[in-house]
Image (cartoon, rainbow, N blue to C red):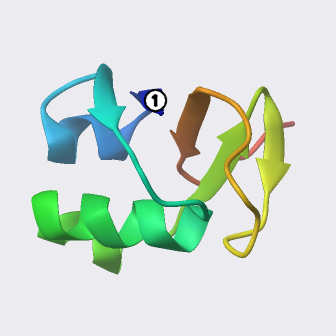
Amino acid sequence: MLLNIKYFGMLAEITNCNEETHEFSKTSVNELLAELFRKYPELEAKDFKVAQNHEIVSNDSNITAPEIALLPPFSGG
């Protein structure tokens, strides 16, 4: 599956991109994160959530959609 991965905030700074496509043949968010941590080792030390089709998902979730976003912590008021 070809994934469109979007990075926000400090995560975009680490990857030096806001968005990229990534060929992914596995099934879970954990497996995707393992691949991204190999590509961008600094990501592993950061706190962030993963969204799939605009919904936060757990790392144990299966990837069922091509749009993934990595979201750093944010605050609102």
The residue drawn where x is 25% and y is 68% is 37
Which residue is painted at 77% across and 27% down in the image? 53
* Figure check: 46 above or below 26: below
Relative to 57, 71 lies left or right: left
- Residue at image coords 73%, 59%: 62
Q: Between 33 and 46, which is closer to the camera in this rendering?
A: 33
Q: How many residues crowd mark 1 within 10 Å: few (<14), some (14–19), many (20+)?
A: some
Answer yes or no: is residue 20 visible.
yes
Q: Is residue 38 above or below residue 22?
A: below
Classify mark 1: helix, strand or loop: strand
Q: Is residue 48 above or below residue 31?
A: above
Left/right placement of residue 47 relative to residue 67 reads: left
Q: Quadrant of residue 2?
A: top left
* 16 displayed left or right of 22: left
Q: Is residue 55 above or below residue 46?
A: above
Q: Residue at x 70, y 42 (%)?
A: 51
Image coordinates for residue 48, horizontal then vertical, percent: 55, 60
Task: Give the camera-side residue of 69 and 2.
Answer: 2
On the image, the x and y values in percent for residue 54 come to 79, 28
In the rendered image, which quarter is residue 17 located in? top left
Which residue does the numbered mark 1 point to in the structure image?
3
In the image, what residue type sits under mark 1?
Leu
Q: Looking at the image, how many numbered discs can be counted on the residues?
A: 1
Q: Is residue 40 visible?
A: no
For the C terminus, the quadrant is top right
